[in-house]
Image (cartoon, helix red, strand yellow):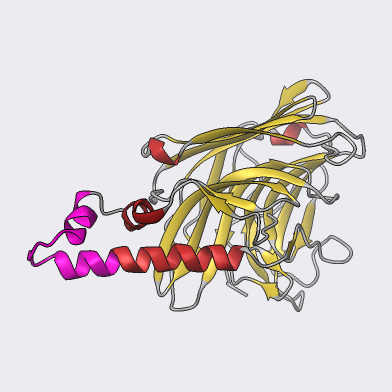
């Protein structure tokens, strides 16, 4: 996830942002009218707060940012394994990262990967007054090179309340927020598919279709090398530091697939799949760990432990 100010865009604007972000539907509309219902002040407050949250998020996302930040050495550094999930990749073992957790398949062969996909139910995010951000996504590249073609959902904590969005990104281009009415429990399916130099990024929200999108972007073969596929829960890292990992209920990804060298398969199919845990800055304890693969290598669970 690379997020830059001038290129951050949204397809929802003006009053529509206030209504959509508030998630209030007719209640938010009523709050904008000259009515005197008992619910009006609360509805108006929610709508205003939602607009402020979105403005704050876009400001947050405008900070210069890096992609995966691996821990030197790549493996566990004094980490106590989660008592809930045992982290074990089927081929490459477990890698540590300061901002990614999940799974990645990788190779040194340029152009090997042409597709990646996965589904999940949007986890509930629990907020404190501190601003926190967690993104859930699938993508190509980024594990060991300098581009990422990705899409999914994100949860942003603003003044103690969670706000959920769908988004896509062609790193090093900016992050693009799309849907703003994602709710916990929404069934999300995300995919990135490449044909030549054209990338189709698509996210579907089964319960709230307004959050769904499909867009085609181009990236030259010499720039986007397509050397990895990922299924990731991320706390974005910026030039000024890494965001605290928002507290989320277990993120279970299922129906994961990738196409490498023309063959569609699961995460476990390789060519070189590895589990990834988020580790704290002192390399002492995990912030998030992932389970082993299940259902034929198509599913795993990311488990939140700490924020920073």
Residue located 41% across and 68% down the image: 52
Q: Is residue 246 visible?
A: no
Give the side of residue 57 with respect to residue 30, left or right.
right
Membership of 35 in magenta stretch? yes
Q: Name the spot of residue 88 as percent of width and height, x first.
A: 73, 50
Q: Name the spot of residue 172 as percent of width and height, x first.
A: 76, 52
Q: Name the spot of residue 274 as percent of width and height, x first.
A: 77, 47
Q: Between residues 167 and 138, which one lies in front from this camera angle? A: 167
Q: Between residues 231 and 207, which one lies in front from this camera angle? A: 207
Q: Name the spot of residue 204 as percent of width and height, x first.
A: 48, 35
Relative to 252, is 263 above or below? above
Relative to 44, is 129 above or below? below
**Main secondary-structure element of the magenta-colored stretch:** helix
Give the side of residue 55 with respect to residue 142, left or right.
left
Q: Between residues 164 and 49, which one lies in front from this camera angle? A: 49
- Quadrant of the rendering where the N terminus is positioned: bottom right
Residue located 79% across and 56% down the image: 95
Relative to 203, is 102 above or below? below
Quadrant position of residue 286: bottom right
Residue located 79% across and 64% down the image: 76
Provide the residue span drawn in magenta. 26-46
Give the side of residue 284 with respect to residue 38, left or right.
right
Quadrant position of residue 221: top right
Give the side of residue 282 with respect to residue 255, left or right.
right
């Amino acid at each position: 996830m690379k997020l830059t100010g001038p290129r951050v865009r949204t397809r929802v604007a003006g009053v529509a942002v206030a209504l959509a972000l508030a998630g209030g539907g007719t209640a938010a509309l009523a709050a904008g009218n000259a009515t005197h219902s008992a619910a009006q002040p609360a509805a108006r407050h929610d709508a205003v707060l939602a607009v402020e949250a979105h403005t704050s998020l876009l400001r947050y996302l405008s900070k210069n940012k890096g992609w995966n930040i691996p821990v030197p050495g790549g493996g566990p550094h004094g980490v106590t394994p989660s008592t809930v999930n045992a982290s074990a990749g089927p081929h490459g073992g477990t890698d540590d990262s300061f901002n990614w957790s999940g799974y990645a398949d990788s190779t040194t062969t340029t152009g090997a990967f042409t597709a990646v996909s996965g589904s999940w139910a949007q986890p509930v995010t629990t907020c404190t007054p501190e601003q926190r951000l967690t993104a859930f996504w699938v993508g190509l590249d980024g594990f060991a090179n300098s581009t990422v073609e990705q899409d999914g959902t994100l949860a942003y904590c603003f003044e103690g309340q969670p706000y959920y969005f769908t988004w896509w990104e062609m790193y090093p281009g900016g992050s693009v927020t799309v849907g703003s009415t994602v709710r916990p429990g929404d069934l999300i399916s995300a995919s990135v598919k490449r044909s030549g130099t054209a990338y189709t990024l698509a996210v579907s929200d089964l319960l709230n279709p307004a959050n769904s999108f499909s867009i085609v972007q181009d990236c030259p073969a010499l720039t986007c090398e397509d050397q990895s596929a990922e299924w990731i829960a991320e706390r974005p890292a910026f030039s000024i530091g890494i965001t605290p990992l928002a507290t989320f209920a277990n993120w279970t990804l299922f129906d994961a697939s990738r196409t490498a060298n023309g063959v569609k398969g699961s995460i476990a199919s390789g060519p070189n799949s590895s589990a990834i845990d988020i580790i704290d800055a002192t390399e002492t304890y995990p912030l998030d760990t992932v389970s082993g693969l299940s259902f034929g290598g198509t599913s795993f669970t990311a488990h939140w432990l700490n924020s920073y």
